[in-house]
Image: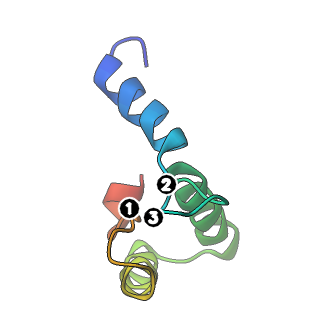
Amino acid sequence: LQDCPEMFTKLESNTKEPLYSGCTKFTRFSTILKLYNLKESNGWSDKSFTKLLKVLKLMLPKDNMLASRTCEAK
C-alpha cells in the first residue's frame, strides 16, 4: 500500500462510506468483505459471484455503493 497511496486512500474511504444513504450497519468495505468471504469459503466462481452482486445491487436502494462485478470487489 505504500507504493499505491491512491489505493490506500480508496480503501480507507470505503471503510467509512455507508452501503447506501441511511445505512448504519454496513459500509461498502464491510459488505464486500462479508460477501467475498462467502464466495471463498463456498468455492463460488467469479462468474457466479458477479451474478450475485448484480442481483443484490438491484435489490438495494438506487444509491447503493455495492460493486456489481467481481473485479470491482477485489
- Residue at image point 41% right, 72% down: 46
- Residue at image point 46% right, 76% down: 49
> For mark 3, what is the residue?
20
Q: Secondary structure at mark 3?
A: loop
Q: Secondary structure at mark 2?
A: helix
Q: Is residue 26 above or below residue 9?
A: below
Give the image quarter of residue 58.
bottom left
Whether tag 1 and tag 3 are in contact, CB under 8 A, the answer is yes
> For mark 1, what is the residue?
65
Pointer 2 or 3: first along the chain: 3
Considering the image in quadrants, where does the N terminus appear?
top left
> For mark 2, what is the residue?
28
How far apart are the alpha carbons under marks 1 and 3?
6 Å
Q: Amino acid at mark 2?
A: Arg
Label 3 Cα neighbours within 10 Å, binned few <14 / some 14-19 / many ≥20: some
56 sits left or right of 67 in the view: right
Give the image quarter of residue 15.
top right
Whether tag 2 and tag 3 are in contact, CB under 8 A, the answer is no
